[in-house]
Image: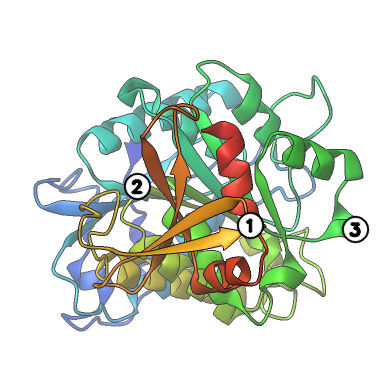
Amino acid sequence: MEHLSPVPESVIDALPVLDANQLGRSIRRHTEMEGLPDLDGIKVAIIGVQEDRRAYRNVGCDGAADAIRPFLYQLYKGKWDYGIADLGNLYKGERHTDTLLLLKEITQELLQRQIVLITIGGSQELTYANYRGYDSLEQTVNIVSVDARLDVGSEGRDLDHQSYVSHLVLQEPHNLYNFTNLGYQTYFNNPEEIALIDKLFFEAVRLGQIQNQIARTEPFLRDADLVSIDMSAVRQSYNPGTFYTSPHGLSGEDLCAITRYAGMSDRLTQLGLFEYNPRLDRNGQSAHLCAHALWYFLEGLSLRFGDYPIGSRANYEKYTVLVDEEDEVHFHKSPTSGRWWIEIPKGGPDSNRTTLVPCDYEDYTEALNGKIPSRWWKAQQKA
């Protein structure tokens, strides 16, 4: 933690006088005078990472955190009974790899303390350092990326914001269990990358599949440990502040719904917000949107149900559907939250072991109509 610098006083000085219920008054803040805040009772920690050396054509995104903070601090907190700390900024290391190592160490420490981490980048390859923070926990990791591009990159390409996914897959230790992209736009992606994601039994969900039905993203987010958001996934009219923005994409409302669903996930321990570039912003429009998205994430955290896998599934309602007159597919529904899961056999045909994968009511109705949900089939291949 000694590598974190305080939240700049210039950020605070620019604010109006804050009410006691505004986030800027209730968040424990790393200051020059008092140092790092006490983390006892803290559930969520925020850090900014001032790294943009691998953000080709989007240089300037290293200043994102300090541009977002004034808008975030002025928002009123909801009915939240947990502590939030802003730990300040991680400056660029001497080398890009130094920044990644320091971020990994900070991530690891906060995960061990069971503190949910919000990372404000910086460029999206910082996701790799967030991911490596799980190494010491010796657990498999599910990652959801919200991005117009898949960011796999060509074979052998160095780690950067457009190739980090291949490094998630190939670099040891191999902790990655599942990767999901939400909102990719076909014309921005090499068909070979799209085919590779499918070959690995990962998920890639096109923008058109979730536009106007954003609730369909919830099951993917419910199963995530880490959600990484590239702000270029949001269309230009809502989000001028990134080089790679385009006329098509998610709306601001979509983004906030996604972060709220992410916060509600009982499994999720990290959210990353990347590629916002204040140099390209207009009147703070994108910074304001980022602040709203973070507010909805914090709201979601306060609404967690304690569903599976945190809680027991013993009292869940079970529904069995016969598909193709051969395959029995079992669905489970939580009586508390109304959320759905699909049952996946584990350990081969002679095993009685099963696990549950999040799904939604539409998956159940599709099964009733004879269509096996793709999540069931892909999860079967990895079980």
Name the residue rendered at 90%, 58% in the picture: 187
Work out whether 236 lies above or below 171. below
Left-right relation of 362 to 234: left
Name the residue rendered at 40%, 23% in the picture: 135
| Residue 225 x/y as whole percent | 42, 45
Q: Is residue 140 visible from the viewing direction of this image?
A: yes
Mark 1 belongs to which amino acid?
A: Glu
| Residue 114 x/y as whole percent | 22, 42
Per the image, label 1 sits on a secondary structure element best described as loop
Name the residue rendered at 66%, 71% in the picture: 210
| Residue 329 x/y as whole percent | 51, 55
How far is disc 3 from disc 1 in space, using C-alphas? 39 Å
First of labels 2, 1 by sequence position = 2
Mark identifier at residue 187 = 3
Q: Quadrant of residue 148?
A: bottom right
Mark identifier at residue 325 = 1
